[in-house]
Image (cartoon, rainbow, N blue to C red):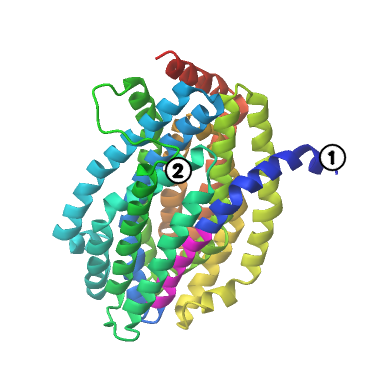
Amino acid sequence: MVLFMTYFPVWKEAYILAWPVILNHIFTTAMRTTDMILMGLFGPAAVTAVGLGDVWERIILRIALGLGTGSISLISQETGTNTKKAKENSDEILSQVIFASILIGIPFIIIGWVIPDKLIGVLGAAPEVVELGAQYLLIIFSAAPFRIISIIAARAMQGTGDTKTPMVVEVIGNIINILLSVVLALGIGPFPNYGVLGVGIGTFTAKVVSALIYIFIFMSSKSQFDLQMPSKDWDYTIIRQLFSVSMPKILQGVYQSVITFPFNSLVLVFGTEAAAAYHISRRIHQQLIAPLHRSYYTVTTILGGQKLGEGDPKESKKVTRGMLWLTLFTIGGFAVVMFFSAPFLIRIFTDDSETISFGIRFLKALSIGAPILTIYAVFAGMLNGAGNTKTALFGNLISQTTFKLGLSYLLSIIFNLGLLGILIGLVIDFIVRALWVGRKYIKGDWVDEAGKMIEERRSN
């Protein structure tokens, strides 16, 4: 009862911000889940092709999330400050990051048209998987600038406390994606049967529509932001801080994407069915756990940044404790359900007996790691709200290299434990990441780091 009364105000504030974020992620993961179910109808090769294509696409996602982290961190602090100068800073932050996203997205379009087959082939996939994956990758790389714009626009709005508008835009985009993917993959009605290519076209169309909606919102007279063209009058303190916060997050995300290449190659050692099982189990985890996991991370960043902007670090720490308790109550419960329903959930995606066997084991391991990974996300979210993204970067570099990849290889290949060795490496990676960011949070020097950043922007 005391626990409830202590953290109820935090949970209430978190709920107001979180439910649109949760709904947004439910639709986003439903879109990806739909893609995986559709590809399951075409066999393990199609599932693996889309899964490996998404491995490369995650580089774009990680870059966008890195820039979005810089936006939400600085804008949430400015929202807490609540001054005219803060409004001007927020406009400049958003304008700078949108301009950067266009420049960053263009090379991906070129790469997607020139060497998509080589990108899929380097992962060690079979010829049929390479052909299908290259078709998919060409289309989704073409959407890179729009993908990045959509993510940073959503994060900027969330930084002000507006989580509903991004929810509406992303739900519209994801519904378009789901409908087009189903129709074009299966050839329903007058539409041709494009298979894997149809899923890519659905994704491309949705990302373009979402980006255009955000730009239209920002250009309207009712927008809380005023977009600016690149100017010599831009405050270079903001540019420096924006990239100081964003770059570690980008590097972390890119590294997480890069390390999935050898990790997927390691899983492929055990066959296409094992790779398909991994992507299916990961998709189930994303559908059931990720909406809460990501919303807790986002809400902790928003509230933490705002409390620090208000000059109230005690409240920011209370937010963290409240979100940790919420993680144990909710994510812990979902993880238990997912663990025991693993056989049923895997069979929704495939009827291949070997894929089912592998998938059950992968999903149970991900269930065990789910609450641990969300504890990591809450700590990392608070540090991000304070402008500290380096701690999570170093934690990921050390943990994923040493345990997700190194220990998994050592146990599965050298000690001949097979997939069991990979499962052990996955769970230990989650534990080490949580301990690493938790250590920084307990140290407490991130409060002073945030204060210095806020004061520096106010004095310019």
**From the viewer's perspective, is residue 39 above or below residue 440?**
below
Report if residue 27 lies within the magenta region: yes
Q: Amino acid at mark 1?
A: Val
Q: Quadrant of the N terminus?
A: top right
Left or right of residue 352, residue 322 in this image: right
Work out whether residue 290 or residue 372 is closer to the camera in this orientation and state it.
Answer: 290
- Residue visible at 27% across and 72% down in the picture: 197
Picture coordinates of residue 312, whole percent (x, y): 64, 23
Q: Quadrant of the C terminus?
A: top left
The magenta stretch spans which residues? 25-39
Picture coordinates of residue 380, whole percent (x, y): 53, 38
Picture coordinates of residue 273, whole percent (x, y): 40, 74
Residue 67 visible somewhere in the drawing? yes
Left or right of residue 325, residue 453 in this image: left
Q: Which residue is mark 2?
A: 155
**From the viewer's perspective, is residue 22 above or below residue 95?**
below
Front tag of 1 and 2: 2
Left or right of residue 323, residue 460 in this image: left
Work out whether residue 36 or residue 217 is closer to the camera in this orientation and state it.
Answer: 217
Quarter assignment of residue 117: bottom left
**From the viewer's perspective, is residue 342 above or below residue 118?**
below
Q: Amino acid at mark 2?
A: Arg
Mark drawn on residue 411: none
Total marks in image: 2
Report if residue 232 lies within the magenta region: no
Question: Are the residues flagged by discs 1 and 2 in contact, CB closer than 8 Å?
Answer: no
Work out whether residue 122 or residue 333 is closer to the camera in this orientation and state it.
Answer: 333
- Residue visible at 62% across and 28% down in the picture: 442
Q: Which residue is mark 1?
A: 2
Determine the secondary structure under disc 1.
Answer: helix
